[in-house]
Image (cartoon, rainbow, N blue to C red):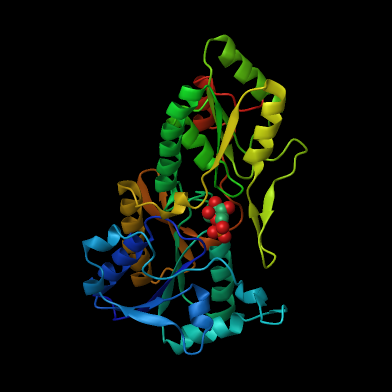
């Protein structure tokens, strides 16, 4: 039996399916060890606030039904870097000390941060600066976190994108149209590539493989010549335009996010091929779906293992899934580089083997 501990858990960054299963797992595992778990709301903002925004988490709050719940039990945010925190006057302040103060005020022995690579980098910096004992759990639909094969939320997002292709194909066939589906993934093309293969796409465009529009046009013409009047194209949101620039949408307040490449692509293809084209931008439905079994499982594995790491006093680590096993890896290595689609890897090879056009040939 380890000494009783008081640990915090927070979610940082964009939400995704499976987060509640991770928190549930950590709470149950900690309770079995006789520990107290404090949930922190809105990521590090909850630690920064005075008083801190927290609630005690008990196993009674986390029966099995919580794994089915879609909205996060603990609210999250993907804005407000504590090292450059926007104030009400439009200036940015370093509020990292406020976060560190919150951690120590709560008398935490350790903190579990559930986040993507950006959040993990920030948490790691805070831990280094403030003597916080940190363990991270990888989550993001983008699946771009280094040193783990899986992040929570990815599998469900792929499922949603695949179902979108399943639903687009019949209407594409009925109208002899070309359907373009734009999916999320930030700078990585994992969702596009895997959903494209699973959903029977004819063309998949991702940022890791430079494409030329002529190759896409030729694929469409070849399909037409073979008697197929429709085509399915999947494009990752950060695939560049023909000039090589990634396409962003600007939002009120100055934020910008990837989005819009599918419309540019659709216009160009309509112009060149004279085909009827329709565009679907899948957006946040990839994050709000009910977690599938794989995400629930991975989240549970990660939640239990994160607590075990704290019991072993192993900090500055991220739990990871590698070679059919749960392991832990150094955060300083995780944040060095994102895990992008390997153009020479087995998934891309599979797509090519299926005759899917990746825009480069
Ligand atoms: O990182 C997850 C993600 O969904 C990306 O795929 C996407 O580019 C971004 O977040 C969208 O962010 P927001 O929720 O701020 O619109």
Q: Nearer the viewer, residue 321 or 79?
A: 79
Q: Is residue 182 above or below residue 212?
A: below
Report if residue 277 is visible in the image. Answer: yes
**Residue 308: x, y in percent?**
33, 66
Q: Residue at x 51, y 26 (%)?
A: 351
Report if residue 207 is visible in the image. Answer: no
Q: Is residue 361 left or right of residue 13?
A: right
Q: Nearer the viewer, residue 146 or 164?
A: 164
Q: Residue at x 54, y 81 (%)?
A: 99
Q: Quadrant of the N terminus?
A: bottom left
Q: Is residue 299 left or right of residue 244?
A: left
Q: Quadrant of the C terminus?
A: top right
Q: Residue at x 45, y 53 (%)?
A: 287
**Residue 246: x, y in percent?**
70, 45
**Residue 316: x, y in percent?**
49, 67
Report how many numbered discs are placed on residues in the image: 0
**Residue 127: x, y in percent?**
54, 74
Quadrant containing ligand 1 reads bottom right
Q: Nearer the viewer, residue 164 or 213?
A: 164
Question: Quarter of the image holding residue 238?
Answer: top right
Question: Quarter of the image holding residue 264?
Answer: top right
Q: Is residue 81 left or right of residue 169?
A: right
């Amino acid at each position: 039996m380890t000494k009783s501990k008081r640990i915090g858990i927070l979610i940082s960054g964009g939400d995704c399916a499976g987060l509640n299963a991770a928190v549930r797992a950590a709470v149950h595992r900690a309770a079995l060890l006789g520990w107290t778990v404090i949930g922190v709301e809105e990521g590090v903002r909850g630690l920064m606030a005075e008083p801190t925004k927290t609630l005690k988490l008990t196993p009674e709050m986390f029966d099995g039904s919580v794994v089915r719940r879609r909205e996060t039990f603990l609210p999250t945010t993907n804005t407000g870097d504590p090292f450059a925190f926007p104030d009400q006057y439009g200036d940015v302040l370093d509020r990292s000390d406020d976060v560190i103060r919150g951690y120590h005020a709560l008398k935490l022995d350790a903190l579990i941060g559930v986040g993507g690579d950006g959040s993990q980098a920030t948490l790691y910096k805070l831990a280094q600066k403030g003597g916080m004992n940190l363990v991270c759990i990888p989550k993001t639909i983008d699946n771009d976190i280094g040193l783990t094969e899986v992040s929570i939320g990815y599998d469900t997002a792929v499922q949603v994108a695949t179902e979108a292709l399943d639903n687009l194909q019949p209407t594409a066939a009925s109208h002899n149209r070309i359907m373009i589906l734009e999916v999320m993934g930030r700078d990585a093309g994992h969702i596009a590539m895997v959903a494209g293969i699973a959903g029977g796409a004819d063309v998949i465009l991702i940022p890791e493989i430079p494409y030329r529009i002529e190759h896409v046009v030729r694929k469409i013409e070849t399909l037409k010549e073979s008697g197929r009047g429709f085509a399915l194209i999947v494009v990752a949101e950060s695939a560049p335009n023909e000039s090589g620039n990634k396409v962003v949408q600007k939002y009120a307040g100055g934020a910008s996010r990837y989005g819009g490449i599918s419309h540019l692509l659709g216009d160009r293809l309509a112009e060149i091929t004279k085909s009827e084209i329709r565009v679907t931008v899948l957006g946040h439905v990839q994050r709000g779906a009910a977690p599938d079994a794989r995400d629930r499982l991975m989240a549970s594995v990660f939640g239990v293992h994160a607590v075990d790491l704290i019991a072993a006093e192993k900090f500055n680590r991220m739990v990871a899934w590698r070679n059919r096993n749960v392991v832990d890896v150094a955060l300083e290595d995780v944040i060095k580089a994102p895990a992008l689609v390997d153009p020479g890897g087995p998934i891309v090879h599979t797509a090519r083997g299926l005759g899917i056009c990746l825009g480069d040939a």
